[in-house]
Image (cartoon, coloured by chain):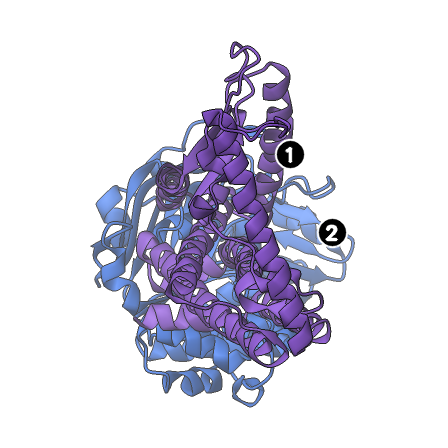
Chain colours: A purple, B blue
Amino acid sequence: MNLVRAELERLGARRFVQLMMVLLVLAFGVTAATTLAGSHRPTASELSEARSQAAQARQQLELTYQRCVDQVNGTLAPGVEREYFPENCSELDPGRMERLPVASDFLTGVFSFDQQARPLLYFLIAFLVLFGFLVGASYIGADLNSGGVVNLLLWRPRRLTVLGAKLGTLLGAVLVLSLLASAAYLATFWVIGQTAGLPGRLDGEFWRGLGAIHGRGMVLVLLASTLGFALATLGRHTSAALGAAAAYAVVWELGARLVLEIVDAARPDQLMLSSHIGAWLSGEARFWDARACINSGTGFCDGSYTLTWAPALAVLLGLTAVLAVAAFTTFRRRDLI
Amino acid sequence: MSAVIEIEGLRKTFHSVRHGRRVAVDGFDLLVEAGQVHGFLGPNGSGKTTTLRALLGLVRPDSGRMSVLGAPSPAQLPQVAGRVGAIVESPQFFGNFTGHRTLRLLARAGGVPVGRVDEVLEQVGLLERGGDRVKGYSLGMKQLLAVASALLKDPELLILDEPANGLDPAGIREMRDLMRSLAAAGVTVLVSSHILGEIQLICDHVTIISQGRRVAAGRVDEVLAGFDQHEFLVRVAEPERAAELLREAGLPVAAHPEHLVVGQVTDASVLSRVLGEQGLWVTELTPLRPDLESVFLELTGEGSHLALPRQVDGSALPDAPPPVDGLIDLDAEAGAGRGGNA
């Protein structure tokens, strides 16, 4: 416990951590200020107009669905021109859609919390993932490089305990900071929605959906922190983690993706970490399989496939676990010179 | 006396893709007994720091046996770590922290009462600057802070790697006094240093390492005595004639422009008698005792090619480890276990 307290104080005193905190507050402040400046409370007439437009849009969806059903059933009214519709009209069924047009979709210059909360949360999660990775890497990387770890091991000559305490402290601190930051962040935009925009439809379903994204985002932040920590431990330096991340992005996500597309490989997206991150964060991600419809003739072919959150989490957890175990194993045996 | 540090047959080889295989420590032995202030000498790259790192569990040896305060190292090092204070090379501290905060964090991590912080800051003379940020400290002050961190645990054994690095003459003197006071309080001290004069002043025992092997060990005075060639510096009015007379008396004489150096002199009165009987009156007669520096240079071979650019541990040693009998090991108890006496 003493070790964790001491590590927590060291972590908090790091200039890099303080700089990232300032950047977080700055990004938070700028986003909130521009949102506040660009939003206003809609007047009654604006609301009325928007509601009318939303109703028209919903009606249009109903009509489209009905035309599809009629065309498939062969009950089109005489003189009605045939259109292109999918074979299965359920894709156009408004009752099955995730969301239908609402009034806030037709309000300009009005911040709607229920519409914007998800993208705002995604932005915050992206920042916290970056924060976790960089802080995780620099926390151990700088200590390994400067001799701080050696100094600590002279006091506590138990390598795994020391490294474990560092990782535990890092993850605990990053999680608490992320929870506090996201709570403050969402609360601020909720207040903006209440006072200078529209809160929107904030029912149980909305909060459950937002909570699920937030929970998955927090897991991603912890995984990124562990990855940064493990890579820097393996490479003995902060830059090892940064280099590994940059190399992966350029060599695999860009280069290998290009090569796989050129050789017409099957489902290259499922080989990319970014796909699994997207699938984990949003629950599932759909990708296009170019080879699926090669022999489908001229008929309708749905060449998409879905990555769901469970295998995506397994991939992310597996990668992180392998690197973390490698880092601990290497650190246990390494000469500290 | 009980052994506080025991190292037998320590061997460590480093492998690197760029530089290949390098033997850093090659069958090294070290014995430090309770209450000693033990100097650990060796040229740069001779294996001092690797030895200390291996002893403290920071480097994995290829072979050899080590123990600290009776506990095999590194397996049982955690059990005695609370009784061992150590600094290895110059430790780095957060520049942003004050000296006081730096020590407080270490005390907290090591389960030491925070009240010790002020005590050790005062002990090393940093109490007044304890509130300053470390980045404002001089190299010597950082070194004192490192020593203070090693003292926090109120250790029975203090291992200091080059503690005088960066210290000014006054700081070196304070460090010397500190080590003396610690030794007087019963703390066993193992100190590695390049400043041979300091080692000679503060250490009662010494071990010299060269190319990863022990080349001398024992009490400082006895190690020096092993190299005493019983030489005297003689100044006399007619040095050429005096040299001739002394040679006739069977003494080896080296003539220098201003003086003579006469060897194998067991009784100084022989010199004055031989010269006085021929009417040559001695104006200076000084015994030339070996100091640690000359012994060190001779043992490590570093004095033999002073005109050449100095290389890292350019000691001249045979390829194979020297026979144990070849060691200058005057520490009777230390040698008894390993047959190291010569």
Q: Which residue bears the numbered disc 2?
A: B256
Q: Report the front residue among A313 and B333.
A: A313
Three-letter code for the amino acid on which mark 1 is drawn: Val
Residue drawn at (62%, 50%), measured in percent from left and top?
Answer: B246
Q: Name the residue rendered at 64%, 53% in the picture.
A: B261
Q: Which residue is outermost to the bottom? A: B128
Residue B252 location in percent, x, y?
A: 59, 45
Residue lying farthest to the front in this orientation: A78
Q: A133 or A137: nearer the eye?
A: A133
Chain letter of mark 1 equals A
B96 displayed left or right of B73: right
Q: How many marks?
A: 2
**Amino acid under label 2?**
His
Query: Which mark is drawn over residue A250?
Result: 1
Q: Secondary structure at mark 1?
A: helix
Name the subunit of mark 2: B
In the figure, A105 relative to A195: above or below? above
Q: Quadrant of residue B206?
A: bottom left
Q: Tell me: residue B128, above or below residue A110.
A: below
Measured Cα–Cα span from mark 1 to mark 2: 73 Å
Q: Which mark is residue B97?
A: none
Residue situated in front as seen by the camera: A56 or A312: A56
